[in-house]
Amino acid sequence: MSERTHHALGLSDAQAIDMYRLMLMARRVDDRMWALQRQGRADFVLGASGHEAVQVGSVFALDRERDWILPYYRDMGVALAWGFTPEDVFLGVFAKKADPMSGGRQLPSHWSDPDKRVFTQSSVIGPQFPHAAGIAHAAKLRGKGAVCVVYGGEGATSEGDWHEAMNWAGIHSLPLIFVIENNQYAISVPTEEEVAGKISDRAHGYGFPGYAINGNDPFEVVATMQTAVARARAGEGPTLIEAETYRYYAHTSDDNDTLYRTREEVETWRKKDPLGAFKLYLIENRLLTEETEARLDEEVTAELADAVKKTEASPDPDEPTTRVYAKPILPDTATTEPDAPIEGETVNLITAINKTLHEIFETYDDAILFGEDVARRKGGVFKATESLTETFGPERCFNSPIAESSIVGVAIGMAAAGFKAIPEIQFADYIHPAFNQIVSEAARISFRSDGRWNCQIVIRTPYGAGIHGALYHSQSIESFYSHIPGLKVVVPSTPADVKGLLFTAVEDPDPVMFLEPKKLYRLARGPYPPGDYRVPLGKAAIRHPGTDLTIIAYGAMAHFAVEAAAILEDLGISPEVIDLRSLKPLDWPTIEESVKKTSRALIVHEDNEFVGYGAEIAAQIADKTFEWLDAPVRRFALPDVPIMPYAGSLEGALYPTPQDIVEKAQELAKY
Ligand SMILES: Cc1ncc(C[n+]2csc(CCOP(=O)(O)OP(=O)(O)O)c2C)c(N)n1
């Protein structure tokens, strides 16, 4: 223990004793969990023992009524100090229906509670840091002095997400504190094999202070946290705290730590046990007597015994498929008629996007947009966001660093804090660094938190080829994301659908991928509906009614299919063109009704054919309308070429045209 006293830190005697009680509780919960696992009563547990001082101490510098925390899986002490009960913990250990973190859907110790401002955590290391930056960014905008604290191990500081979040926090001077619990090992890998230099020094590179402290001294932790909290509340920005400590148990109940560390090493660290040192301090300062210590121990033990008894007997979860979405969408009726004619000023697709974003910003004060080059001066590389910054201010439309994972991760955090986040990825080809944030984080938040959190973000991105953009400006990404439960995926092909779908997407409580067919940005023109206008998600549009065959397309190909339909009519063939608009959820009833009428189906997309989106539709048609078919279901899509080549002659040979669609449709009609 350092020379500090609890009084010097502003802590009362009662608070000092409570701090000890919580540290003791964390240790005893840990021991009990591990015992239960060894008895075969729990499947898997994680250990916090050894980390109690940094975990409990850090909370004593925070305001539990307004601050946010993102504890990682080892943070039993943080969780208990923040107000989670042993009963909450054991409901997770036994994976029970009443588990408040995830309803038994996640591993134990994956903390979450919207009412306590504890954002849902998963097993991954790294993605929580951009979430925390998003929450801190939201807190800064709200201006009420709330601070966000994000925890992680030293191993997590090698992740790109950590660096991206540090950068974001530095750029925006966020009220964010990074607490890194350096317990010397990332599973079996010692710190020197993970990190060159000191972790705390890295903060300086991002423009804010970093401290290396003794994480086993609760008062050093409180003192450093108090400095960081004061700085954050004063609007001065983030702080990194690297707290040196050690874990006593193996990494998890699945790990054998004798393979990578010696008994002597563990014993050396046990001599620096934070609990022992703190107890001594309390005894020396006459705050703890033998009787109070015994009473505390008895109370904690009884509370745990009671919690285990209650939770082990509570019901198991029984709903494995619910709460995938905050708002599930099932198409109620098929769209059998072409959409009603739309009135309005004629604009192109990109103008429609820009106008809709302005309307959304006017309608919702909490709508916020960021991405690369989106702000003033440029207004986006395609001008989609032009003049948003000038009209609504740099807080609501601002440039992000070129770091896609954090663009999405920050949006997730902002959504957690109540904003309607509309991040832009400059080209769909650059979205892959954010794949994990979209697929394993945003998409799973509702399900993994048993519906207690949702993720209201709309990721806008231009996709597709036909613009002479080659690799990194031509990719189609829709099948990756349509595959994922928890995401919604829409593709507008008309200015009216841009408005209707973008409004609906922004109002939807789930993460929506808004894929903009950039080939149509200036090519597709049509009326822009004034006033309130919404297009529901999960509803296709019949663009051209017909009786001889069904052409199913979306994006640029829907536009081309309509052009092809006019030519086919002149050739005596009557095609019905369905523009899906929504890839997930899919409007199956509209497809079914059409195919039952025409008995022939051609699916057109500009993504590769192999395991492309058309494969799913073809399978469903074959499965559900087999008796009505007069011809095989055909797909017209790209061959397996890794990139859209730059040369006009090569791209021209690959990229489907209306005339190509006419030829494929003729073949199918003749079959
Ligand atoms: C992105 C990612 N890669 C790998 C893993 C597997 N994994 C789980 S914990 C862990 C070590 C983490 O070490 P550290 O961040 O130091 O935290 P500690 O467990 O030591 O507290 C690893 C590699 C993971 N969870 N996430």
Image: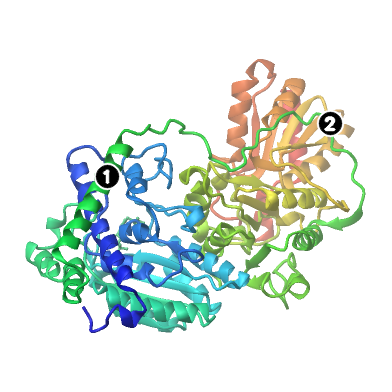
In depth, the one of 436 and 230 nearer the eye is 230
> What residue is shown at x 54% (from left), y 47% (from top)?
480
Give the CA separation, mark 2 to mark 1: 55 Å
In this picture the colour scheme is: rainbow
In depth, the one of 401 and 295 nearer the eye is 295
In depth, the one of 231 and 388 nearer the eye is 231
Under mark 2, the amino acid is Glu
Element assignment for label 2: loop
Vertical order, 617 against 211 (above or below): above
Q: Quadrant of ligand 1?
A: bottom left
Left or right side of 577 for 251: left
Label annotation for residue 261: none
* Disc 2 residue lies near ligand 1 with CB under 8 A: no
Question: Which part of the image, by quadrant, shows the N terminus?
Answer: bottom left
Q: First in sequence: mark 2 or mark 1? A: 1
Asked if one can make out residue 160 in the rendered structure from this viewpoint, the answer is no
Vertical order, 509 against 397 (above or below): above
Left or right side of 99 for 3: left
**Badge nearest the viewer, 2 or 1:** 1
Under mark 1, the amino acid is Phe
Look at mark 2 in the image and give the residue it sits on: 337
Residue 93 image point, x, y percent: 31, 44
Question: Which image quadrant for residue 572?
Answer: top right
Question: Which part of the image, by quadrant, shows the C terminus?
Answer: top right
- Callout 2: few (<14), some (14-19), or many (20+) C-alpha neighbours within 10 Å? few
Left or right side of 463 for 568: right
Residue 193 image point, x, y percent: 24, 70
Vertical order, 175 against 100 (above or below): below
Look at mark 1 in the image and give the residue it sits on: 44
Residue 659 image point, x, y percent: 78, 42
> What residue is shown at x 25% (from left), y 70% (from top)?
191
Element assignment for label 1: loop
